[in-house]
Image (spheres, rainbow, N blue to C red):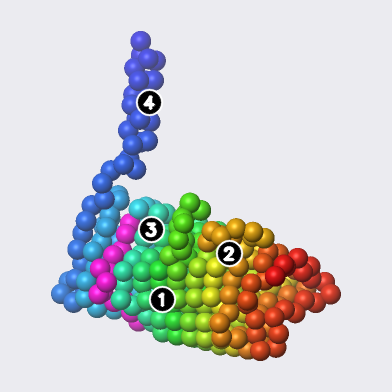
Amino acid sequence: MKRSKINLKRGLFIVFASFLWLLPSVARAVNCDTDGPGALQAAIDAATGPTTILVSGTCNENVAIREDKNRISLDGQGTATISGPVTTSSVIQVRGRGITILNFAFIAGGQDGILVTRGGTADIQSNTIQSTGGNGLVVNSHSFARIINNTIQNNPLDGIVVSENSSARVGFLSFNDTAASPNTIQGNGYRGVTVVRSSNAVIVGNTISNNVDDGVVVSRDSQADMSDNIINSNGGSGIFVSRNSGVNLGNDTGTSIFDLPNSTTVNNTGFGIECVTNSYADGRQGTVTGVTGATSFSSSCVNSLIP
């Protein structure tokens, strides 16, 4: 009898725990103009379950969402801004799970704009990330992010970096999507998107333009699927793949956002697609091109592209 009571209690606990994810999100409001220094970090620290933090005003702080935080949303409501005064830390560092950052009029300053790291997972939606101290958005150290409807511009280094065994979806949420949720990645001081160090990304439907160096770089044992992107007027090549890496550029046939080739309407400065050092490109070449030519493949690269 005693054993059956223990088992019953265990069963009830498991049922209760399995439904915790259904609990509604608690809403909290933070006005950075009136609530004082550190108000946003205090609200994040106080969150104990699914929480939406409605942010307003001008926030001048670097914030961190720790590993023990889950299902927290920071919603800038289209008008809030956040600037990181500490240049050695990211403006927003995400180490928690199921974190959403959305609707900030701009995120600026800091070392990088948003850093998703140490196994963190995040949705980054409808923000302007600009004029940071380094990269716009970094996903590294075994982390994952979905990045949609953002403008990522005028950062001194890369627009987006996916690194160190991490992965990202850039321009869509689900493989069931029938239309892209495009990001504009432009005017960054180095590259538009970099996928590096055993990482992978699926990059769909974005406009990647006017970055000082290459539009997209995939390097150092990494892989990217790229389809239906506009890759224009970058200072290097449109797509550069190197060091035991590969890109799949849409599919050989089909018209979905995951099938369509990429395109260029204003030439990149280098090649459209450039490949060096034991790498490959597969799929459709599309109209991606550059002033120097449409493609360049070193002898160690595999060119499986079709027109």
Tell us which disc is closer to us: 4 or 3: 3
For this view, does 117 lie left or right of residue 282? Answer: left
Residues under numbered marks 3 and 1 in contact, where contact means CB atoms less than 8 Å apart:
no
The residue at which mark 2 appears reads as 260
Q: Measuring from the top left, give residue 213's x and y in whole percent.
A: 59, 85
Q: Measuring from the top left, give residue 197's x and y in whole percent.
A: 64, 67
Task: Tell me the amino acid under the disc marked 4.
Answer: Arg
Task: Tell me the amino acid under the disc marked 3.
Answer: Ile
Tell us which disc is closer to us: 3 or 2: 2
Vertical placement of 230 versus 7: above or below?
below
Q: Nearer the viewer, residue 45 or 290?
A: 290
Q: Earlier in the sequence, mark 2 or mark 4?
A: 4
Measure how far apart labels 2 and 4 are at the Cα level: 51 Å
Look at 51% across and 53% down and name the residue there. Answer: 175
The residue at which mark 3 appears reads as 99
Which disc number belongs to residue 55? Answer: none
The residue at which mark 1 appears reads as 151
The residue at which mark 4 appears reads as 10
Measure how far apart labels 1 and 2 are at the Cα level: 23 Å
Circle 1: element type: strand
Circle 2: element type: loop
Quarter of the rendering occupied by the N terminus: top left
Residue 219 in sight: no
| Residue farthest along the left direction in this orientation | 34
Which portion, as a residue range, is magenta? Answer: 72-85
| Residue farthest along the right direction in this orientation | 299
